[in-house]
Image: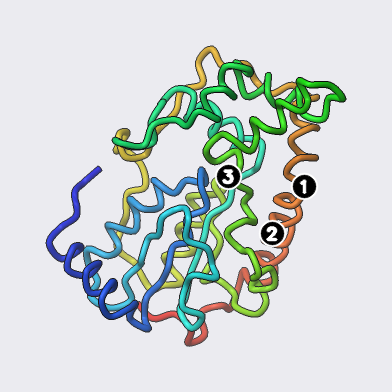
Amino acid sequence: MRPETLRDRLVNATDRVFGYPKDSIHFLHVPKTAGSQIKLVVRQVNAGRIQNRIRAHEHDVRLIDLPSDQRYFFSTRDPLTRFRSAFHWRQAKGEMKPGKPRSPNEMRAFGLFESANDLAEALFRPDQRGIDAALAMKSIYHTSRNLVDNFTLHGFDLVLRPPVWIIRLEHIEEDLAEFLRRIGHDAPVKATGEDRYARKQSYDGVPPLSDLAKDNLRRWYTQDYEFLRACENWLSGNSAGFAHGRVAG
């Protein structure tokens, strides 16, 4: 990851002391939804801006934590691929970052379940393994988080406080292009190519999700699927005519 520039550090320090400027655009980082790729784009956008800069937040920041009069955007991902990625990322990495190792809860979860499919197939079983599976889901970093958790107490904000745009991992190129158009950024950006930053993950040797595993995960993440349905409905209703004075470059 490219280190912060002097200007980045000055801007971040100013934010901490004086608060975010009114023209800030906030990236609400839902875990395991292409945040690394999007933050790579954010750095490139901010490099050419003094005003209307994007503030990229950490996972624990929710919509309720952002100033209510400032713009924001976020990314989403199908819960099935998000779960599989989260499980095997934590299983393979061992540490999220220096000084933050896997927890005892995670270690126990990975001791009981060898793969994401193994864990998902055990969900809702009427025995101890089913209980262990539910506890493991709430123990592993990111699998314990729902997409909708970042919108606690703000469920209607797609209507009451709409985002600039929603970036779906499954449509990342077109959604990023639309987001950049809406904030008035017409310079080229690079969303891939820095392997260390993008945290690309290999699934060689990892078993795919079975039909049972998929059915169980759809049941477990029911709230997320309903939230994604609301997001798709919002995107369909706002696909044209959005930039009428709200977004400045």
**Observer-nearest of 123 and 49:** 123
Q: Tag 2: residue type? A: Glu
Dividing the picture into quadrants, the one containing residue 239 is bottom right
Check if mark 1's residue and mark 2's residue have beta carbons within 8 Å: no
Three-letter code for the amino acid on which mark 1 is drawn: Thr
Q: CA distance from mark 1 to mark 2?
A: 15 Å
- Image: 52 above or below 143: below
Most foreground residue, 191 or 29: 29
Query: What residue is disc 2 on?
Result: 232
| Left or right, residue 73 beside residue 49 | right
Which sits earlier in the primary sequence, circle 1 or circle 2? 1
Per the image, label 2 sits on a secondary structure element best described as: helix
Q: Quadrant of the N terminus?
A: top left
Q: Quadrant of residue 241?
A: bottom right
- The answer for how far apart the CA atoms under marks 3 and 2 are is 12 Å
Identify the mark at residue 23; answer none if there is no mark. Answer: none
Label 3 with label 2: CB-CB less than 8 Å:
no
**137 or 169, which lies in front?**
137
Tell us which disc is closer to us: 1 or 2: 1
> Residue 225: x, y in percent?
73, 50
Q: Residue at 75% of width from left, 23% of height from top? A: 121
* Residue marked by disc 3: 170
Q: Which mark is residue 222?
A: 1
Residue 217 image point, x, y percent: 74, 35
| Neighbourhood count class around disc 3 (C-alpha, 10 Å): few under 14, some 14–19, many 20 upward | few
User: Against 24, is 113 above or below?
Assistant: above
Residue 147: x %, y % from top left? 62, 51
| Most foreground residue, 59 or 245 | 59
Kindly give the residue lying farthest to the front in the view shown.
104
